[in-house]
């Protein structure tokens, strides 16, 4: 099949191409992606854990035929890990191998050349020579700290990085930026202001069944529906950590791996850990497994 | 549609009016967003309402909480005229509103100042003066909050704002250059390169420090009424200097962090009363904390947060639920402090069912009935160690 990687022409086109790649999103997400591409603005995606935020960026890269550059954020992430760092061991080695008589100034210029630069994701995304600009995924920005956020704000406004020894590097083609957040803390408004925003909600039953069929094809049709219905039931309960779509998929795959074609109380009980990650939640749900199973079978 | 196509000219003023409506409802809808919206709509098939709606949503909304407001505003503004829809149904986010003459009256009823106290305010003789060897300030520090006049609370606010303590710091994962500490290989190597590859000098680094975030969860139910105003003033004073997330509850939980950010304390108090619908209602501490654990804990308890619950422990809910929620909260915070204004009263023992259920899970159990007590709390916060109390 000839894969079309030209920039999508309509929202329908975005929708269809996401679907081709087995990403079942809603039309609002397709609209946001389409507009982010057209307006050349970063797309800020928020949602609970495991609703497919990161996956959306990955699929987008595939849709555009672009390289995916991923920066996973964490507390304390700094420029040396996000943008660039000099390869000091190599520089030291190089300078020691130089002949004493050689011109020092020349040597210094040599070791501060791009050859000795360790390029981290952000520099990589800006200093790209790709035919199609890459997709830059800044994942879980809520895990980084305010200092990093401030830096990112600057980067996203002019897409350039300055390295004192080399000069300013500006993106010839700015990357398509996708920022995700689990909302473990509020990201600063100034950063959000530069972006288009989309909130990914949990899917409804029909959509979740569709997702399981697309992403976990090993689960039989009836099983896919039952698992999706089970998770929908769990989401209605008062839990510390409500299962996301990622958990639904894990659960469907686990059950399929056990050879199940349909759920029953003992199977659900044995595999509950695929969906629930807190001891209190497990205890609470264990008592209600028979009722949940019955309800899921009726859905 | 060609790239340079422009918006139907008649739509622009309507879009501007819609942006104003969103702005009035508390969303950020400045000129930049409006420009983005006009640019976005060029790419949209306007006949499809869903796309039109999504396009405006993705531009104007930037947090989940604003989505319902946006949807309601959209429905009202863009829907064909329908007599069944009436104005005023937008769930407006609380904003600072201008002063109204009813305000003082509203405050006195909500925050438990009775009429005689209001009158006493006008009376300068009631201002605490220096007598019996104590300074006025000293007297004020030990005066129970529920005996204070309006004017005294004003003075208390100033005292609280000037309090000298700051919350203790925690280590972050970010490193800073330092005289002592672990060797900073990156900087040392860099220096070595400048000096012909000889490692002449070792540089060092250590983790940078940051103040711990505070989370305040405040009971504003009927039994706490007498203390509510001062506790809000306390929250306001702390929010000036510390990284504070604040919530109030009586039957349900309301986040007031954003309300506390306004500059004028009276506006803050005003919008808290307007934004919190169950001031002085009954108490269900367990339900409120459960709400917090499920909806907010993951968002505000990162980075070694210290949680402060302020309540007298009069609970109409289920003590077992309260215990379970506190247990969870205790495990997900660096330190859990319970402030009880009743501790100040003579002969008080934590005998209420709620308090008895709560005690095993609190690291500290302190008074909160006067300025002195809040100062003690401040000292505790300033001295918090690196490790949690007992876990």
Image (cartoon, rainbow, N blue to C red):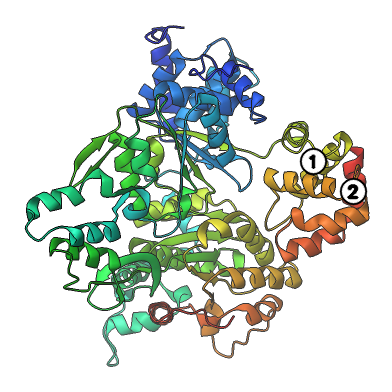
Q: Residue B79, position in %: x, y?
A: 58, 17
Q: Is residue B262 above or below residue A32?
A: below
Q: Residue B130, position in %: x, y?
A: 26, 85
Q: Name the image quarter holding residue B220.
A: bottom right
Q: Residue A185, position in %: x, y?
A: 48, 53
- Same chain letter for marks 2 and 1: yes
Q: Secondary structure at mark 1?
A: helix
Can the viewer see residue B128?
Answer: yes
> What's the chain of the residue with tag 2?
A
Please identify the quadrant where the N terminus of chain A is shown: top right
Q: Nearer the viewer, residue B359 or A115?
A: A115
Q: Residue at x 36, y 81 (%)?
A: B141
The circle on residue B80 is none
Q: Which residue is mark 1?
A: A228
Q: Is residue A64 above or below residue B197?
A: above
Q: Secondary structure at mark 2?
A: helix
User: Position of A173 compared to A212: left or right?
Assistant: left
Q: Nearer the viewer, residue B99 or B212?
A: B212
Can the viewer see residue B88?
Answer: no
Nearer-N-terminus badge (2/1)? 1
How much space separates mark 2 and mark 1, taking CA atoms?
Answer: 11 Å
Q: Name the image quarter holding residue A54.
A: top right
Q: Which residue is mark 2?
A: A293
Q: Nearer the viewer, residue A237 or A167?
A: A167
Q: Residue at x 40, y 27 (%)?
A: B20
């Amino acid at each position: 099949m000839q894969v079309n990687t030209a920039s999508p022409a309509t929202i329908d086109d975005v929708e269809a191409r996401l679907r081709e790649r087995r990403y079942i999103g809603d039309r609002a997400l397709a609209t946001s992606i389409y507009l982010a591409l057209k307006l050349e603005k970063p797309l800020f995606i928020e949602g609970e854990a495991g609703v497919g935020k990161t996956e959306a960026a990955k699929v987008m890269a595939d849709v555009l035929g672009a390289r995916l550059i991923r920066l996973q954020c964490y507390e304390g992430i700094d420029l040396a890990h996000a943008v660039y760092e000099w390869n000091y061991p190599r520089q030291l080695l190089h300078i020691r191998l130089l002949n004493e008589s050689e011109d020092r100034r020349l040597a210094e210029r040599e070791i501060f050349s791009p050859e000795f630069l360790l390029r981290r994701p952000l520099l990589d995304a800006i200093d790209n020579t790709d035919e199609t600009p890459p997709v830059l995924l800044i994942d879980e920005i809520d895990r980084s700290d305010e200092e990093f956020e401030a830096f990112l704000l600057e980067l996203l406004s002019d897409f350039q990085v300055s390295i004192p020894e080399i000069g300013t590097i500006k993106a010839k083609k700015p990357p398509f930026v996708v920022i995700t957040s689990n909302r473990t803390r509020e990201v600063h408004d100034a950063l959000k202001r530069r972006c288009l925003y989309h909130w990914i909600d949990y899917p409804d039953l029909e959509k979740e069944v569709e997702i399981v069929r697309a992403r976990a094809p090993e689960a039989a049709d009836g099983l896919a529906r039952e698992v999706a219905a089970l998770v929908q039931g769990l989401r209605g309960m008062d839990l510390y950590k409500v299962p996301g779509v990622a958990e639904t998929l894990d659960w469907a795959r686990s059950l399929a791996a056990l050879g199940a074609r349909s759920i029953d109380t003992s199977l659900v009980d044995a595999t509950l850990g695929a969906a629930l990650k807190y001891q209190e939640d497990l205890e609470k749900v264990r008592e209600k497994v028979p009722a949940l199973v019955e309800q899921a079978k009726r859905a | 549609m060609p790239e340079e196509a422009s918006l139907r000219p008649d739509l622009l003023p309507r879009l501007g009016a819609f942006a104003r409506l969103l702005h009035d409802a508390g969303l950020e809808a400045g000129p930049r967003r409006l420009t983005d919206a006009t640019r976005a709509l060029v790419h949209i098939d306007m006949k499809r309402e869903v796309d039109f709606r999504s396009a405006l949503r993705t531009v104007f909304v930037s947090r989940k909480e604003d989505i319902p407001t946006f949807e309601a505003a959209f429905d009202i503004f863009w829907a064909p005229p329908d007599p069944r829809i009436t104005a005023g149904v937008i769930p407006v986010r609380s904003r600072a509103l201008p002063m109204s003459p009813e305000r003082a009256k509203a405050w006195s009823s909500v925050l438990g100042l009775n009429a005689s106290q209001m009158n006493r305010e006008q009376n300068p003789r009631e201002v605490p003066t220096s007598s019996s060897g104590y300074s006025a300030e000293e007297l004020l520090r030990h005066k129970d909050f529920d005996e204070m006049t309006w004017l005294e609370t004003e003075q208390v606010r100033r005292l609280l704002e000037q309090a000298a303590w700051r919350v203790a710091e925690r280590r972050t994962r970010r490193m800073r250059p330092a005289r002592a500490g672990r060797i900073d290989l990156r900087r040392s190597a860099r220096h070595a390169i400048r000096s012909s590859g000889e490692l002449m000098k070792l540089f060092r680094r250590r983790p940078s420090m940051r103040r711990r975030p505070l989370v305040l969860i405040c009971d504003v139910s009927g039994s706490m009424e007498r203390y509510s105003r001062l506790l809000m003033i306390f929250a306001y004073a702390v929010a000036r200097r510390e990284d504070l997330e604040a919530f109030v509850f009586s039957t349900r939980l309301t986040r007031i962090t954003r309300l506390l950010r306004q500059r004028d304390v009276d506006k803050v108090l005003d919008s808290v009363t307007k934004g919190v619908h169950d001031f002085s209602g009954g108490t269900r501490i367990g339900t409120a904390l459960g709400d917090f654990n499920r909806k907010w804990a993951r968002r505000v308890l990162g980075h070694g947060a210290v949680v402060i619950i302020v309540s007298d422990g009069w609970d109409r809910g289920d003590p077992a639920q309260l215990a379970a929620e506190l247990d969870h909260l205790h495990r997900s915070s660096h330190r859990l402090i319970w402030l009880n204004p009743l501790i100040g009263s003579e002969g008080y023992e934590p005998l209420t069912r709620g308090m008895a259920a709560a005690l095993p899970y609190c690291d500290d159990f302190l008074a909160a009935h006067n300025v002195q007590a809040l100062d003690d709390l401040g000292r505790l916060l300033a001295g918090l160690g690196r490790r949690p109390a007992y876990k």
